[in-house]
Image (spheres, helix red, strand yellow):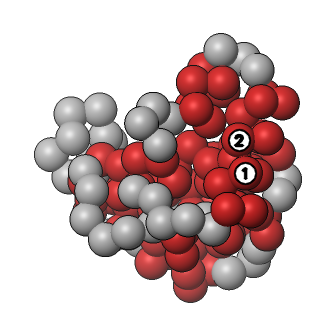
Amino acid sequence: MSENAVLRHADAGDWELAVAEAERIVEAGDRLDAGDAWPAVMVLYLRGDLAGASAVPPLVSPGGADADRALLAAWSASVAWARGEVAACRELADRALAGAAGEPRAPSPRSSRWSPH
């Protein structure tokens, strides 16, 4: 994708189009980068489509911006939590916090009340 249509539609408040675009990503099954993946996971998770949200991360190519990989891990942690996958949730949350290190908008891992650290 040249621009992130899922995020553009979600930001505009057009959730039906955002969901349709996220579902298209899952159905196509094409490789994508983390910057295109995390908004799809977010929208599908918020819609309650945990199976769809879980289908996106395996499509992600290695590499990409640290912030996008951290957001993908964070939203994937939410999906894992909702599915009752506590160990996967913890691992993904730790990955998200580590990936966000140095990002000025990210909270410190020590500032999180739920963090076991």
Please state which amino acid type lies under the numbered disc 2: Glu
| Nearer to the camera, 10 or 3 | 3
Residue 9 is at least partly visible in this image: yes
Check the image and name the residue furthest to the top: 12
Q: Are the residues at dot 1 and dot 2 in contact (C-beta closer than 8 Å)?
A: yes
Residue 111 is at least partly visible in this image: no
**Residue 108, image x, y percentages:** 27, 47
Task: Give above or below for 71 relative to 11.
Answer: below
**Residue 117, image x, y percentages:** 33, 70
Kind of element beneath mark 1: helix
**Residue 56, image x, y percentages:** 61, 65
In the rendered image, which residue does mark 1 sit on? 24
Q: Is residue 84 left or right of residue 100?
A: right
Q: Is residue 105 left or right of residue 19?
A: left
Residue 21 bears which disc, if any?
2
Residue at image point 56% right, 43% down = 39
